[in-house]
Image: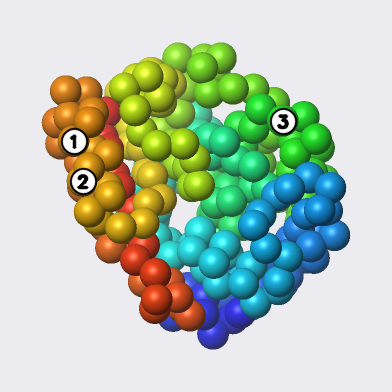
Amino acid sequence: MTKGLIEIGFSENEAERISVLMEKYINEIILFNSAYNLTNTSDHDELVIRHIFDSLAPYKDFCKLFENAHNNTDFIAGDIGSGGGLPGIPLAAAFPDVNFYLVERMAKRCAFLENVAALLGLKNVTVINSEAEKIQKENFDVITFRAFRPLDDKMTKTLLGITKKGGTLAAYKAKIDSIKTEMEEIKKIVPDYEIVNLTVPGLSDSERNLVLIRKI
């Protein structure tokens, strides 16, 4: 795993530190997956590539998004519909100085997330058992989500509503053609956005992108 993290852009020391944490995390996913339906696989290598590497592939992009987080205790990043903690747990491990709120509506998954955060010593993680619609308005500086529902009018308004002015939505998506079709449906709400192509180590057969939407 360390080699892949270095390919993504982590220093060797950071890659080694994060690898140790992610191995513990993967073990917990494998242990509880059948009971909590956390991911679509329990295979170790698939979890590393399709979930850990995929979550951390936009590391350099998040470095830019989080540049105002240092020495700012009010800076909050949210992982909406966190599920088993992807991408929230890997990102929280990679950015220990950023406060992450993992928002998940299913109580049993929240219990899993709290256990993982404690096991990994992620003191920057807060788990919120809630739907996105019930979160306080203008609460997050950065919102991210992966394997979440498509961006329709209602959900886009909800997510932008809980994002601070000047904040950013960072959505993990797949094919550019599908992204453009999805974004065309909400162009009245989001007239402008950016697509960042992602390179995921070991995943050359799948197109991966990050969609950035800034709230003006």
Q: Is residue 154 visible?
A: yes
Q: Which residue is mark 3?
A: 106
Q: Position of residue 72 (x, y in %)?
A: 47, 36
Name the residue nearer the viewer: 178 or 75. 178
Which residue occupies 73% across, 65% down?
Answer: 42
Amino acid marked by disc 3: Met
Above or below — where is 73 with respect to 13?
above
Proximity of marks 2 and 1: CB atoms separated by less than 8 Å? yes
Q: Which residue is mark 1?
A: 184
Quarter of the image with the C terminus is top left
Secondary structure category for the residue under label 2: helix
Q: CA distance from mark 2 to mark 1?
A: 6 Å
Q: Is residue 99 visible?
A: no
Dot 3, crowdedness within 10 Å: few (<14), some or many (≥20)?
some
The residue singled out by tag 2 in the image is 180
Horizontal and vertical percent position of residue 120: 76, 56
Indicate the amino acid at tag 2.
Answer: Lys
Foreground residue among 84 and 69: 84
Q: Amino acid at mark 1?
A: Glu
Looking at the image, is mark 3 or mark 1 earlier in the sequence? 3
